[in-house]
Amino acid sequence: MSMWDLFSLIGGLAVFLYGIIIMNRNLTAIAGEKMKSIMLTLTKSRPRGYFTGLGITIINQSSSATTVLEVALVSAGLMTFHQSIAVTLGAELGSTFLPHIIALPKISKFAPIIVGCGFFASLALKRQKSINIALVILGFGLLFLGLDMMSGSVDPLKNFSPFIDFMTKIEAPILGILFGLVFTLIIQSAGATCGLTIAMAISGTITLEQAIPINIGASIGTVLTALLASLALSWDAKRAALWHMISQIIGAIFAFALLMIRFDAIGGERLYIWLTKWITATVFRTDGLARQIAVGFTLIPLIKCILFFSIPKFLDGIIIVFEKMFKPKEKEKPFGATYLEEQLVESNVDIALEMAKKEMLIGAELVKEMFGKVDMAFKNKDIKLINEIRAADLRVDILNKAIIQFLAKISNKELGDEGTKKSMNYLYIQNTLESIGDIIDKGLMVTAKKMLDLNVTFSEQGSKELEELHGKVMNNINRMLKALIEENAPAAKNITEVYSDVEERKYQLLHIDRLQKGIKVSIDTSSIHLDVVSYYARINEYVVYIANRITWLVKEHV
């Protein structure tokens, strides 16, 4: 194997991994926000949770991405650890879908055309969703381009004695598993490890007996991403990540056990290898080595799924052992409204309205905390902080839905003037608080993520101006909250008359002045900077609107 072949192998692996990254990023952007709501809605039972994890992972093509999202939701209290168990198992099976696509080697011939179509379409199209679709096509083409590069580069290895000797040793399952584990820990993609074994199979440099143990090890190595994502999160989030690791280890143990079993009835072949060949021949009507490797990779979570769900209490027993090893710190309870009791609507409307306000103030505090962290998210370009803020908006959305439904039920009752006034104004205020949360989540945090991806930084003066503007809006949020708690009309009126103007135009002109002076960092961050100014101003407008509602709340007439 020449040095050029080695460079071609490394480059092919890089192209392959980049294809996975592009596909994952843009498939997630297309399905994006729906994934969180889908996961929250469809995980109430084990079967639904399993198929949710399976479906989402087939869409985003990354079990790591699914488990990281799942860990974040558990940390935010939006999903319990027990709900996450089935999602993890489904994600593990979903992650084996990609190798089946890769096992279509004939597509490699069309890889340059697919890459060209995806790339030029992404330049020509205008709508963001269309661009995302074009980039998915580009990533798909890069997968096969990288596969073709790897396959060509490893071809000389089939006649290279040291490599042949090494791969002979790899056939011993434990060594192959260790090699796959270490390699996947380095590249952080079990799909890429499996893709490499398929590329080597296409070139004739590896056998099924050598590929299977490597891919079993890869299934364990992929858990590192979720473990790292959980480090700064809650204990339940850490438990969800640990379950992912232990679940993969259990699957590897089952697969290893089947690899160690030989039967004379099947020619003394290892049971796992025979089973892989039989499924490939029966289901796919082929004996192609690439397809056999893909089936062998799928078989790991599939066997585990069959054992977990077909044997009564088997999964429950494993969970009991897990919970003894990693005890929950407190009784699990998914995040939700605390004070909205249905019977109050029937028995005492006045108390029901007070409970609605109490719940609304919890949501308002969440919005305040979210906005308080925004400036630091931009300064530090911290993805963990960005995800933390976005997870908080899910809590705001859950409270908003519960509060609006509760207030709607109250509105259907016979209310006096005071009750009608409160009910209506609480509805307006709650909707506005939820809108502020959406601006932070879908506006400011998307912008912060863009800044992180582009690896750009605001100018020193620009950063100070944004900090100043953020401080003004933050002070208004604090004033508004105080006025809302007390239902203090003079304090609310003070916001609308004295603090309503945050001088959006002033901050825009200061930035434009730096652009005219040709300051490079200001030019690089121009659209982001102006977007942030605009978002801050819109949030302040909503705060002022709530202040107006507070003044109307305590008037004699609505």
Image (cartoon, rainbow, N blue to C red):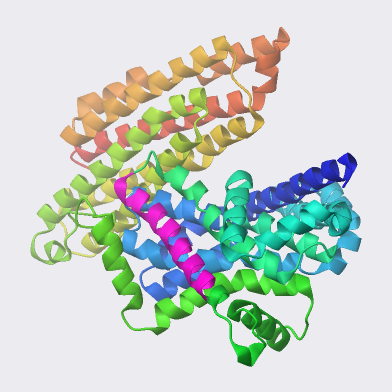
Main SS class of the magenta portion in the image: helix
What's the residue at 55%, 53% (across, down)? 221
Picture quadrant where residue 59 is located: bottom right
Which is more toward the observer, 312 or 473?
Answer: 312
Res 358 seen here: yes
Res 58 seen here: no
Question: Where is residue 249 drawn, in percent x and y?
Answer: 46, 62
Left or right for 298, reference 313: right
Left or right for 511, reference 165: left
- Residue at far bottom of view: 265
Vertical arrangement, residue 318 with respect to residue 278, above or below: above
Question: Where is residue 363 drawn, in percent x and y?
Answer: 29, 44
Which is more toward the observer, 84 or 278?
Answer: 278
| Residue range corresponding to the magenta coloring | 234-257
On whether residue 138 falls in the magenta region, the answer is: no
On whether residue 246 falls in the magenta region, the answer is: yes
Q: Quadrant of the C terminus?
A: top left
Vertical arrangement, residue 481 with respect to residue 258, above or below: above
What's the residue at 35%, 38% (across, down)? 367
What's the residue at 21%, 60% (across, down)? 410
What's the residue at 65%, 16% (across, down)? 522
Picture quadrant where residue 358 is located: top left
Question: Where is residue 359 drawn, in percent x and y?
Answer: 22, 48
- Residue at far top of view: 517
